[in-house]
Amino acid sequence: MNSKIDRPDPRRWRALAVTLAAGFMSLLDVSIVNVALPSIQQSLGASTAGVQWVVSGYALAFGLVLVSGGRLGDVLGRRRMFLFALSAFVLTSALAGSAVNETMLVVARLLQGMAAGMLTPQNTGLIQELFSGAERGKAFGLFGTTVSLSTAVGPLIGGSIIAVFGAEDGWRWVFFVNVPIGALALVLAARLLPRAPRRGSSLRSELDFVGIGLLGVAVLGVLFPLVQSDQGGLAAFWWMPVAAVPFGAAFVLWERRVVRRGGSPLLDVRLFTETPGYATGAAIGAVYFAGFSGIWLVFALFFQQGLGYTPLESGLIVTPFAIGAAVSAAVAGRLVARLGRRLTLLGLSLVTVGLTTVGIVVPMVSASMAGLAAAAPLLVAGVGGGMVISPNTTLTLEQVPTRMAGVAGGALQTGQRIGTAIGVAMLASMFHVGIDSAGGYLAGLRWAMLSAVAMILVALVLAVVDVRRRPGLSRTEQAQAANTTPTPTE
């Protein structure tokens, strides 16, 4: 009658702080490099195509390995994979900062993106492993704060580093700053992260290499034209997304076959069909990131090229979004167990109001007042954004078995990476369409903001559908979501 009660790891909050610090670095490197591109071109004499690959190569490699990295964490242990991936990220950051030519920098960024893609899913997996019940919501709230902050403050941090170290070599410190922080995180993670028991089965029998290949080709087919959109990738490589479809279908069929035969699939597709809320939550995340992530490139182009602001000034303008998101994500993590999907609805509504206001008000004021006019609506949008990411992650993963937490988190973030690539390509295109019209940069901002709002409204509709499907959890479902066993009633 006595059962063993698993006590939570007393070091879990300190371990979370370390893993989130590492995750912040890896996500920050998606956006921080944008403001350093002129410095890189000046220092290395790099071509326009080369510096574009410094940005897009990282994003491409990042998205390609997320699911595989999550699966490796499930199989090998998340502590082991976290330490390996973080070590690789530190080394490749040093390699990027030491680059002597364009080719070396692009290769370093590709390797750095792979390391980040293996590191990121360990965060969500460790949260699933270390926390349960209301604590898990709080932990995902901090994770949401990390994602929101890393996305929004990248331009500000990058602009600050270049302002301190100068245009010639400032870009190198954008990468070098990862080295001491990453090394400290590595030492602390080795001490704080729990060790996983060794598996009796071999790595070869646990990894689905055919699935890795099929999914890799499918994701590559979708991402490559999108990350190359600024160089005409959508027109030149239009056939790649078409070719990705049969590979994606083959991946699903293969994974089902592996499951039927009792094997270990890369991604058990039953996550999408039999895990309540996972498919809808993944769709909400992908669509929201499509509308949300591209606005930072638009703001950088509008304020720097259109209005003549410096990179640092441009970064300061979007800081209210980061502040609002940081505060609301932490609060939302505490409220998600009580309010559920309604938090996501409120958050998406606030983002819609904030970005719509930016698109209407900023083009109506003078260039000197544009930054001030954007501050309040961006704060509102940031508060809403913080209510989207962390609650959606919690609700999407709440009923995923812990043994699949890594691959489920990797798949969720792969959708977000694809959404990000789609959003950046779409918003940049709409921005340039607006510029080419009679309205110039002001029309470009308006077109881009309206396009972002349209995507966020799609996410809002999906959230409404999810609320209607599960207006409330039953007592048993609540216990399952908290990873506890309900007390039977007689």
Image (cartoon, rainbow, N blue to C red):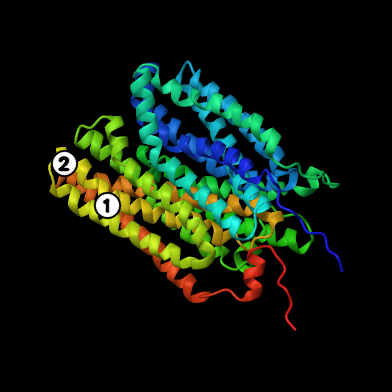
The amino acid type found where label 2 is placed reads: Met
User: Which quadrant would the N terminus be assigned to in this image?
Assistant: bottom right
Q: Are marks 1 and 2 in contact (CB under 8 Å)?
A: no
Residue 301 appears in view: yes
Residue named by callout 2:
369
Disc 1 residue crowd, few under 14, some 14–19, many 20+, Cα 10 Å: many
Q: 190 or 438, which is in the foreground?
A: 190
Dot 1 amino acid type: Pro
- Is residue 342 found left or right of 192 in the rendered image? left
160 is higher (above) or lower (below) than 205? above
Q: Where's residue 386, x and y in %?
A: 42, 53
Q: Is residue 484 above or below residue 476?
A: above
**x, y percentage for residue 366?**
12, 42
Mark pair 1, 2: CA separation: 14 Å
Counting residues from the N terminus, which is met first, the one under dot 1 or under dot 2?
A: 2
Residue located beneath label 1 in the image? 377
Quadrant where the C terminus sits is bottom right
Q: Is residue 225 left or right of residue 2?
A: left
Q: Residue at x 66, y 29 (%)?
A: 187
> Residue 345's quadrant in the figure?
bottom left
Residue plotted at (36% across, 35% down): 155
How busy is the neighbourhood of tag 2: few (under 14 within 10 Å), some, or many (20 plus)? few
Label 2: element kind: helix
At horizontal 61% and vertical 76% (from top left) the residue drawn is 474
Mark number displayed over residue 76 = none
